Image (cartoon, rainbow, N blue to C red):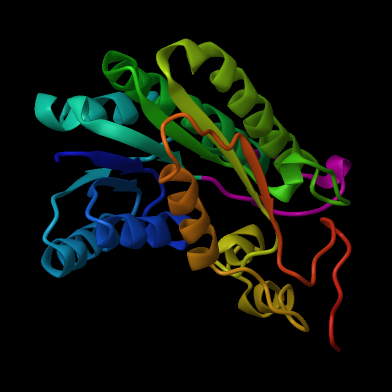
Amino acid sequence: MVKYVFITGATSGFGEACSHIFAEKGWNLIVTGRRNDRLEKLAAFLTSTYNINVETLNFDVRSLQEVNKGIESLSSEVKSNIEILINNAGLAVGRGPIDTGEIDDWERMIDTNIKGLLYVTKAIVPYLKQNKKGHIFNIGSIAGKEVYPGGNVYCATKHAVDALSKAMRIDLVQYAIKVTNIAPGAADTEFSLVRFKGDEETAESVYNGFEPLVAKDIAETIYFVASRPQHVTINDLVIMPTAQASATVLWKNE
Protein backbone atom coordinates (compact mmCIF):
# COMPACT_ATOMS: atom_id res chain seq x y z
CA MET A 1 0.00 0.00 0.00
CA VAL A 2 1.30 3.47 -0.90
CA LYS A 3 1.26 5.67 2.18
CA TYR A 4 3.39 8.62 3.22
CA VAL A 5 4.32 10.38 6.43
CA PHE A 6 5.35 14.04 6.10
CA ILE A 7 7.98 15.10 8.67
CA THR A 8 9.26 18.64 9.18
CA GLY A 9 12.64 19.27 10.79
CA ALA A 10 13.80 15.78 9.80
CA THR A 11 17.53 16.53 9.79
CA SER A 12 18.05 15.96 13.53
CA GLY A 13 16.42 15.10 16.84
CA PHE A 14 12.84 13.90 17.01
CA GLY A 15 12.25 14.38 13.28
CA GLU A 16 15.21 12.27 12.25
CA ALA A 17 14.30 9.56 14.77
CA CYS A 18 10.71 9.50 13.47
CA SER A 19 12.04 9.12 9.93
CA HIS A 20 13.95 6.01 10.94
CA ILE A 21 11.16 4.29 12.84
CA PHE A 22 8.48 4.93 10.20
CA ALA A 23 10.83 3.80 7.44
CA GLU A 24 11.59 0.62 9.38
CA LYS A 25 7.83 -0.03 9.58
CA GLY A 26 7.46 0.30 5.80
CA TRP A 27 6.16 3.85 5.44
CA ASN A 28 7.24 6.07 2.56
CA LEU A 29 8.51 9.45 3.68
CA ILE A 30 8.49 13.12 2.79
CA VAL A 31 11.24 14.68 4.87
CA THR A 32 11.86 18.41 5.09
CA GLY A 33 14.53 20.63 6.58
CA ARG A 34 16.88 23.56 6.05
CA ARG A 35 20.10 21.49 5.78
CA ASN A 36 19.92 19.85 2.37
CA ASP A 37 23.11 17.83 2.78
CA ARG A 38 21.64 16.11 5.82
CA LEU A 39 18.33 15.54 4.04
CA GLU A 40 20.02 13.87 1.09
CA LYS A 41 22.19 11.71 3.34
CA LEU A 42 19.13 10.65 5.38
CA ALA A 43 17.11 9.86 2.25
CA ALA A 44 19.92 7.79 0.73
CA PHE A 45 20.33 5.74 3.90
CA LEU A 46 16.63 5.08 4.43
CA THR A 47 15.97 4.25 0.79
CA SER A 48 18.77 1.70 0.59
CA THR A 49 18.15 0.22 4.04
CA TYR A 50 14.37 -0.15 3.99
CA ASN A 51 13.52 -0.16 0.28
CA ILE A 52 11.01 2.67 0.60
CA ASN A 53 10.45 5.90 -1.31
CA VAL A 54 11.79 9.08 0.29
CA GLU A 55 10.96 12.54 -1.05
CA THR A 56 13.09 15.44 0.22
CA LEU A 57 11.95 19.05 0.44
CA ASN A 58 14.61 21.61 1.32
CA PHE A 59 12.85 24.64 2.83
CA ASP A 60 12.55 26.79 5.92
CA VAL A 61 9.09 26.49 7.50
CA ARG A 62 9.25 30.21 8.34
CA SER A 63 8.77 31.04 4.66
CA LEU A 64 5.19 30.61 3.44
CA GLN A 65 6.38 30.85 -0.15
CA GLU A 66 9.00 28.11 0.31
CA VAL A 67 6.53 25.84 2.12
CA ASN A 68 3.88 26.14 -0.57
CA LYS A 69 6.36 25.83 -3.43
CA GLY A 70 7.92 22.74 -1.91
CA ILE A 71 4.66 20.94 -1.24
CA GLU A 72 3.24 21.87 -4.64
CA SER A 73 6.30 20.29 -6.27
CA LEU A 74 5.28 16.84 -5.05
CA SER A 75 3.48 14.61 -7.50
CA SER A 76 -0.30 14.24 -7.23
CA GLU A 77 0.14 10.58 -6.29
CA VAL A 78 2.44 11.41 -3.39
CA LYS A 79 0.28 14.26 -2.07
CA SER A 80 -2.92 12.22 -2.25
CA ASN A 81 -1.32 9.44 -0.19
CA ILE A 82 -0.12 11.53 2.75
CA GLU A 83 -1.67 9.97 5.85
CA ILE A 84 0.44 11.42 8.67
CA LEU A 85 1.88 14.89 9.26
CA ILE A 86 4.49 15.33 11.99
CA ASN A 87 4.95 19.04 12.74
CA ASN A 88 8.34 18.69 14.38
CA ALA A 89 10.28 21.77 13.23
CA GLY A 90 10.78 24.03 16.22
CA LEU A 91 13.39 25.58 18.48
CA ALA A 92 14.21 27.57 21.57
CA VAL A 93 16.66 30.46 21.22
CA GLY A 94 18.05 32.23 24.26
CA ARG A 95 16.85 32.18 27.85
CA GLY A 96 16.45 35.08 30.24
CA PRO A 97 14.12 37.76 31.63
CA ILE A 98 11.56 39.29 29.28
CA ASP A 99 13.13 42.76 29.46
CA THR A 100 16.52 41.52 28.26
CA GLY A 101 15.20 39.28 25.50
CA GLU A 102 16.52 39.69 21.96
CA ILE A 103 13.85 40.55 19.39
CA ASP A 104 15.50 38.37 16.74
CA ASP A 105 15.31 35.36 19.09
CA TRP A 106 11.63 36.04 19.74
CA GLU A 107 10.84 36.30 16.06
CA ARG A 108 12.72 33.09 15.20
CA MET A 109 10.73 31.16 17.79
CA ILE A 110 7.36 32.66 16.88
CA ASP A 111 7.97 32.29 13.14
CA THR A 112 9.15 28.68 13.43
CA ASN A 113 7.13 27.21 16.29
CA ILE A 114 3.78 28.83 15.49
CA LYS A 115 3.68 30.28 11.99
CA GLY A 116 5.74 27.50 10.41
CA LEU A 117 3.48 24.87 11.95
CA LEU A 118 0.44 26.72 10.60
CA TYR A 119 1.88 27.13 7.10
CA VAL A 120 2.66 23.41 6.75
CA THR A 121 -0.62 22.29 8.29
CA LYS A 122 -2.69 24.52 6.02
CA ALA A 123 -0.92 23.09 2.96
CA ILE A 124 -1.27 19.43 3.99
CA VAL A 125 -4.77 19.29 5.52
CA PRO A 126 -6.65 19.43 2.18
CA TYR A 127 -5.11 16.07 1.22
CA LEU A 128 -6.10 14.52 4.55
CA LYS A 129 -9.64 15.87 4.21
CA GLN A 130 -9.86 14.48 0.71
CA ASN A 131 -9.15 10.98 2.09
CA LYS A 132 -11.45 11.40 5.12
CA LYS A 133 -8.67 10.20 7.40
CA GLY A 134 -5.23 11.16 8.59
CA HIS A 135 -3.23 12.02 11.67
CA ILE A 136 -1.46 15.24 12.64
CA PHE A 137 1.21 15.21 15.34
CA ASN A 138 2.23 18.56 16.78
CA ILE A 139 5.47 18.45 18.75
CA GLY A 140 4.88 20.68 21.73
CA SER A 141 6.75 20.66 25.03
CA ILE A 142 6.38 20.62 28.79
CA ALA A 143 6.87 24.37 28.16
CA GLY A 144 3.40 24.31 26.62
CA LYS A 145 1.94 23.09 29.92
CA GLU A 146 3.77 25.30 32.40
CA VAL A 147 5.97 28.40 32.35
CA TYR A 148 9.43 28.50 33.88
CA PRO A 149 11.92 31.32 34.63
CA GLY A 150 13.60 32.66 31.52
CA GLY A 151 11.37 30.66 29.19
CA ASN A 152 8.79 33.41 28.52
CA VAL A 153 8.52 33.58 24.71
CA TYR A 154 9.47 29.94 24.09
CA CYS A 155 6.84 28.84 26.62
CA ALA A 156 4.31 31.13 24.93
CA THR A 157 4.96 29.52 21.54
CA LYS A 158 4.54 26.02 22.94
CA HIS A 159 1.35 27.05 24.76
CA ALA A 160 0.16 28.14 21.31
CA VAL A 161 1.00 24.71 19.89
CA ASP A 162 -1.00 23.12 22.70
CA ALA A 163 -4.00 25.36 21.94
CA LEU A 164 -3.70 24.84 18.19
CA SER A 165 -3.68 21.08 18.66
CA LYS A 166 -6.99 21.29 20.52
CA ALA A 167 -8.42 23.67 17.92
CA MET A 168 -7.35 21.46 15.01
CA ARG A 169 -8.97 18.45 16.66
CA ILE A 170 -12.25 20.35 16.86
CA ASP A 171 -12.04 21.68 13.31
CA LEU A 172 -11.07 18.35 11.75
CA VAL A 173 -13.05 15.77 13.74
CA GLN A 174 -15.78 15.71 11.07
CA TYR A 175 -13.18 14.43 8.59
CA ALA A 176 -11.98 11.62 10.89
CA ILE A 177 -8.58 13.32 11.15
CA LYS A 178 -6.77 12.64 14.40
CA VAL A 179 -4.66 15.31 16.12
CA THR A 180 -2.13 14.53 18.84
CA ASN A 181 -0.08 16.98 20.89
CA ILE A 182 3.22 15.49 22.07
CA ALA A 183 4.80 17.35 25.01
CA PRO A 184 8.31 16.12 25.88
CA GLY A 185 10.26 17.10 28.94
CA ALA A 186 14.05 17.23 29.06
CA ALA A 187 15.42 15.52 25.96
CA ASP A 188 19.06 15.33 24.88
CA THR A 189 18.92 16.47 21.25
CA GLU A 190 20.25 19.63 19.57
CA PHE A 191 17.66 21.60 21.59
CA SER A 192 20.00 23.04 24.23
CA LEU A 193 22.83 23.60 21.77
CA VAL A 194 20.50 25.78 19.69
CA ARG A 195 19.03 27.49 22.74
CA PHE A 196 22.48 28.46 24.00
CA LYS A 197 23.65 29.42 20.51
CA GLY A 198 26.39 26.86 20.06
CA ASP A 199 27.77 26.98 23.61
CA GLU A 200 28.51 23.25 23.93
CA GLU A 201 29.63 23.37 27.57
CA THR A 202 26.43 25.05 28.75
CA ALA A 203 24.25 22.85 26.54
CA GLU A 204 25.82 19.66 27.88
CA SER A 205 25.51 20.82 31.49
CA VAL A 206 21.70 20.86 31.17
CA TYR A 207 21.66 17.06 31.21
CA ASN A 208 24.30 16.43 33.87
CA GLY A 209 23.30 14.27 36.81
CA PHE A 210 20.26 12.50 35.36
CA GLU A 211 19.21 10.40 32.39
CA PRO A 212 17.23 12.56 29.92
CA LEU A 213 14.94 11.43 27.17
CA VAL A 214 16.50 10.74 23.78
CA ALA A 215 14.96 11.29 20.36
CA LYS A 216 14.16 7.60 19.91
CA ASP A 217 11.93 7.67 23.02
CA ILE A 218 9.68 10.26 21.42
CA ALA A 219 9.73 8.62 17.98
CA GLU A 220 8.68 5.26 19.42
CA THR A 221 5.82 6.94 21.28
CA ILE A 222 4.66 8.74 18.13
CA TYR A 223 4.70 5.49 16.16
CA PHE A 224 2.71 3.75 18.91
CA VAL A 225 0.05 6.46 18.83
CA ALA A 226 -0.05 6.43 15.01
CA SER A 227 -0.56 2.66 14.98
CA ARG A 228 -3.71 2.68 17.15
CA PRO A 229 -6.95 1.55 15.46
CA GLN A 230 -8.86 4.15 13.46
CA HIS A 231 -11.49 4.60 16.19
CA VAL A 232 -8.84 5.44 18.82
CA THR A 233 -7.27 8.89 19.17
CA ILE A 234 -4.76 9.90 21.83
CA ASN A 235 -5.16 13.65 22.00
CA ASP A 236 -2.36 14.70 24.32
CA LEU A 237 0.76 13.11 25.83
CA VAL A 238 3.27 14.54 28.30
CA ILE A 239 6.47 12.47 28.26
CA MET A 240 9.15 13.03 30.88
CA PRO A 241 12.39 11.43 32.01
CA THR A 242 11.81 9.54 35.24
CA ALA A 243 14.08 12.04 37.00
CA GLN A 244 11.88 15.00 35.99
CA ALA A 245 8.65 15.79 37.83
CA SER A 246 7.92 19.19 36.24
CA ALA A 247 9.67 21.71 34.02
CA THR A 248 11.83 22.86 36.96
CA VAL A 249 11.88 19.86 39.31
CA LEU A 250 14.68 17.44 38.45
CA TRP A 251 16.30 14.83 40.69
CA LYS A 252 19.99 15.02 39.88
CA ASN A 253 22.65 12.65 41.20
CA GLU A 254 25.42 15.17 41.64
> Looking at this view, is 254 or 28 the one in front?
28
In front here: 77 or 147?
Answer: 77
Residue drawn at the location 39% of the way across and 44% of the way down = 8
Horizontal and vertical percent for residue 37? Answer: 24, 61
Q: Quadrant of residue 58?
A: top left
- Look at the image and give the residue range highlighted in magenta: 90-103
Q: Please indicate, yes or no, whether residue 63 appears anywhere in the rendered image.
A: no
Specify the quadrant that holds the C terminus: bottom right
Q: Report the residue at 67% width, 35% height from top.
A: 157
Whether 141 is drawn above or below 215: the answer is above
Instruction: Please give left or right for residue 143 compared with residue 52 in the image.
Output: right
Q: Quadrant of the N terminus?
A: top left
Is residue 106 found left or right of 8 in the rendered image? right
Occupied quadrant, residue 71: top left
| Residue under the point 37% across and 53% down | 10
Horizontal side, residue 76 vs residue 63: left or right: left
Magenta run includes residue 95: yes
167 inside magenta stretch: no
Q: Position of residue 244 (x, y in %)?
A: 80, 66
Residue 110 visible at all? yes
Q: Main secondary structure of the magenta part?
A: loop
Please determine whether, in this image, residue 8 is positioned above or below residue 19: above
> Could you tell me how many numbered marks the image carries?
0
Residue drawn where x is 65% and y is 51% of the image: 93
Question: Residue 108: image x %, image y %?
Answer: 57, 40
